[in-house]
Image (tube, helix red, strand yellow):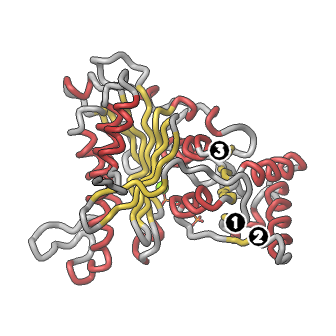
Amino acid sequence: MYSRKLITLDEFTIQELRNFPQATGELSGLLRSIGLAGKRINAEVNRAGLVDILGAAGAENVQGEEVQKLDDFANKTLLDLLNHSLYCAAACSEENENVILFDDPISNSSKYVVVMDPLDGSSNIDVNVSIGTVFGVFKRISPLGTPAVMEDFLQQGKLLVAAGYILYGSSTMLVYATRRGVNGFTLDPSVGEFCLSHPNIQCPTDGKYYSVNYGGYKTFGKGVQQYLDACEERGTQPKEGYKLRYTGSMVADIHRTLLKGGIFMYPASADAPNGKLRLVYECIPFSFIMRIAGGVATNGEVDLLEVKPTGLHERTPYFLGSSEMMAELKQSMQVGDSIA
Ligand code: AHM
Ligand code: MG
């Protein structure tokens, strides 16, 4: 009998629809559009090393077109595909100050809005280190048939319908979570399809990797410092085997944390009391994914999925990972977390 091992992203979303006859297919359609955008961005990311040959950003390439910065390209590609997907009323992006309303009759009757960081890890773009796209999908609260409003984007993370990321790494992966689970798809470049490679991802309850910009250690609060001291101590004991891992690309660092177990953090510091990372389109989507996979995410005080954003580009201290490591961190932070 003919049997197939590979299930593509499109087939998977259609199969999910079959399992839930009440579903309208709109979310599946939206995810497929994001997958297509991911493939286009991936092609451009792979060509990035040729930029010196093809022309630097801002200059004209051999075809006489202006070479775009990769983050601009990623943003435009995603916005274009979302706009034409029929399933998205509006989007907000790290690259745009304000919400982007698609504002035509079809978009206004769509029930979803998308929050996104089109290409995260900007400091790694030019040096061939992994970078990624982050996205979250909310059901809008404004009435269908009218343009979306700001409040559609400032919802608590626990209200997300889906969230995911695309990692442009040694291979390209799309991982997305809905309430039914977290699934990972690897791009098969020979056929240009994302294929199911990591079904039902669960974050291990404990881990050995801790991921933080250690350069900021002296500026972190006492509780965070204490926790990091304990990790360092465990790193000296071969049986414990703790290891520090930090690429400076959140998508890669959290992907490792999700698959292998561990903890990732970007704490508040003396000079940045709200940390660096963005609440709406970076931390909220990853917190949802981590939670569905069995992990924990906080801002150091409360569950991050409970936090109601007040602005599109708000920043937050951020901690997420394996439940046991997160419980230990919580204990350290209660001991005292005044900024050093
Ligand atoms: P970006 O949105 O400008 O790319 O910044 C976000 C990135 C994250 O991917 C990463 O975790 C963090 O910034 C690294 O910052 P730092 O260099 O301060 O450690
Ligand atoms: Mg970013």
Residue found at x 84% / y 67%: 229
* Marks 1 and 3, the one that precedes in the sequence: 1
- Is 173 placed left or right of 50 in the picture? right
Residue under label 3? 294
Circle 3 — which element? loop
For mark 2, does the 10 Å Cα neighbourhood hold few (<14), some (14 to 19), or many (20 or more) residues? many
- In the image, what residue type sits under mark 1? Tyr
The answer to whether 101 is drawn above or below residue 331 in the figure is: above
Instruction: Please tell me which residue lies in front, 73 or 207.
Output: 207
- In the image, what residue type sits under mark 2? Tyr
Residue found at x 46% / y 53%: 184
Answer yes or no: disc 2 within 8 Å of ligand 1: no
For mark 3, does the 10 Å Cα neighbourhood hold few (<14), some (14 to 19), or many (20 or more) residues? some
Residue under label 1? 209
- Is 313 placed left or right of 306 in the picture? left
Circle 1 — which element? strand
The image position of residue 217, as x and y in percent, is 75, 66
- In 3D space, how far apart are the residues under numbered discs 3 and 2 (Cα atoms)? 21 Å
The image position of residue 335, as x and y in percent, is 90, 49
Residue found at x 31% / y 31%: 26
Q: Which mark is residue 242?
A: 2
Q: Locate ligand 1 by image quadrant.
A: bottom right
The answer to whether 130 is drawn above or below residue 74 in the figure is: below
Q: Picture quarter containing residue 47?
A: bottom left
Q: Picture quarter containing residue 56?
A: bottom left
The image position of residue 183, as x and y in percent, is 47, 48
